[in-house]
């Protein structure tokens, strides 16, 4: 058990897509702060895809070192039956979820890598549909499944992981960016809907961040990997996780419907 102030002690936190990448780092941070965490991915072997861990069970086991309860579940967040099954499994084992982090998603097309082509006029319909499921419908279905228990409990916190790409026009990655912009606005709308029921809904928009998939699927700029004191660099997963932990915890108890860009100042403009 770490000596960090356990501000999330007694809370149950579900971090989607936590088998690897940002989700895993976020799950570890919430466990370090005392939360019981549900480790999740689309399938059992997703953590192995970029060499981060052998499988989902190994990730959950590793996080047990923080001394809180963990469980591992699989399911496609864009599939309503799978989301409902996960909600039943989790509630039966750990009780109602208090903190929901919608992290699963990314610019992952139907074949498992980045869509190709990935610009507005040429991306395939199948890739568009896959991206919508992974990045928007999945987030909506998760909120529908887990927010009612938060309302019943008198409060809770939802943190949606959007992207810096949600905040400016760009090509390629057009569909992905558009969907993250939708996640940003969905965050505000859901915050309005749940405001009087004590459930806070916020989003974090990371800039380019050094996860294993990020590094494996693009040509990285070595100068951005290690930029010394400059904030003109790629982010570290822990830098995103710290802000998610803030939004999940009591220090953010009056923060609602906000989008925090964690990008070192890459997007320094309004909107
Ligand atoms: N790494 C970055 O630079 C960066 C920047 C901005 C936003 N983000 C966002 O952060 C989140 C995590 O990204 P990452 O870099 O850690 O990538 P990652 O691929 O390592 O993690 C994403 C996880 O989500 C899972 N997932 C995707 N679709 C799913 C579905 N339909 N059902 C269940 N699980 C699903 C994947 O299997 C994977 O484990 C994503 O939403 C991504 O868009 C990442």
Image (cartoon, grey):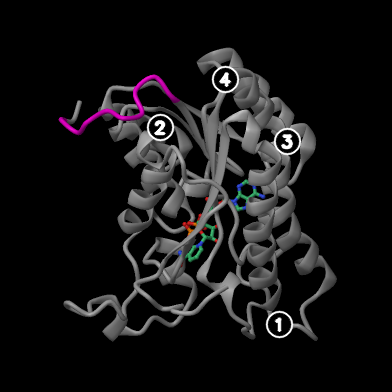
**Circle on res. 117:** 1
Q: Do the residues under discs 4 and 3 have CB atoms within 8 angstroms?
A: no
In the rendered structure, which disc, 1 or 4, sits on the residue that comes first in sequence? Answer: 4
| Above-or-below relation of 206 to 31 | below
Q: Which mark is residue 144?
A: 3
Above/below status of 261 relative to 75: below
Disc 4 residue crowd, few under 14, some 14–19, many 20+, Cα 10 Å: many
Give the residues in magenta: 3-11
CB within 8 Å, label 3 to label 2: no
Name which residue lies at 69% across and 54% down.
186
Specify the quadrant that holds the N terminus.
top left
Disc 1 element:
loop
| Residue 240 covered by magenta stretch | no
Residue 200 in which image quadrant: top right
Report whether 165 appears left or right of 33.
Answer: right
Q: Position of residue 8 (x, y in %)?
A: 36, 29
Task: Work out whether 176 lies above or below 130.
Answer: below
Viewer-nearest of discs 2 and 4: 4
Distance from the alpha carbon under mark 1 to that under mark 4: 42 Å
Disc 2 from disc 1: Cα separation: 36 Å
Image quadrant of ligand 1 equals: bottom right
- Residue at image location 53% in from the left, 46% down from the top: 256
Pick whichever of labels 3 and 2 is earlier in the sequence: 2
Residue indicated by mark 4: 96
Classify mark 4: helix, strand or loop: loop
Residue receiving disc 2: 60
In this rendered view, identify the residue nearer to me: 133 or 157.
157
Q: Position of residue 45 (x, y in %)?
A: 52, 44
């Amino acid at each position: 058990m770490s000596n960090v102030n356990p501000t999330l002690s007694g809370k149950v936190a579900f971090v989607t897509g936590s088998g690897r990448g940002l989700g895993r780092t976020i799950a570890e941070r919430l466990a370090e702060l005392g939360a019981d965490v549900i480790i999740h991915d689309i399938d059992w072997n997703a953590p192995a895809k970029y060499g981060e861990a052998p499988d989902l069970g190994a990730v959950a086991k590793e996080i047990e070192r923080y001394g809180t309860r963990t469980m591992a579940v699989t399911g496609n967040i864009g599939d309503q039956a799978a989301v409902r099954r996960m909600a039943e499994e989790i509630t039966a084992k750990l009780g109602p979820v208090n903190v929901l982090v919608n992290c699963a998603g990314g610019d992952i097309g139907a074949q498992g890598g980045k869509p190709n082509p990935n610009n507005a006029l040429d991306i395939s319909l199948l890739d568009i549909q896959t991206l919508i499921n992974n990045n928007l419908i999945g987030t909506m279905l998760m909120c529908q499944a887990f927010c009612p228990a938060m309302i019943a409990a008198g409060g809770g916190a939802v943190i949606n992981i959007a992207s810096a790409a949600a905040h400016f026009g760009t090509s390629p990655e057009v569909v992905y960016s558009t969907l993250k912009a939708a996640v940003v606005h969905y965050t505000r709308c859901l915050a309005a809907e749940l405001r009087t029921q004590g459930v806070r809904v916020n989003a974090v928009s990371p800039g380019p961040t050094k996860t294993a998939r990020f590094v494996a699927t693009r040509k990285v700029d070595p100068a951005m990997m290690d930029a010394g004191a400059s904030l003109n660099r790629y982010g570290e997963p822990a830098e995103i996780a710290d802000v998610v932990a803030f939004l999940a915890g009591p220090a953010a108890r009056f923060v609602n419907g906000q989008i925090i860009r964690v990008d070192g100042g890459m997007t320094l403009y309004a909107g």
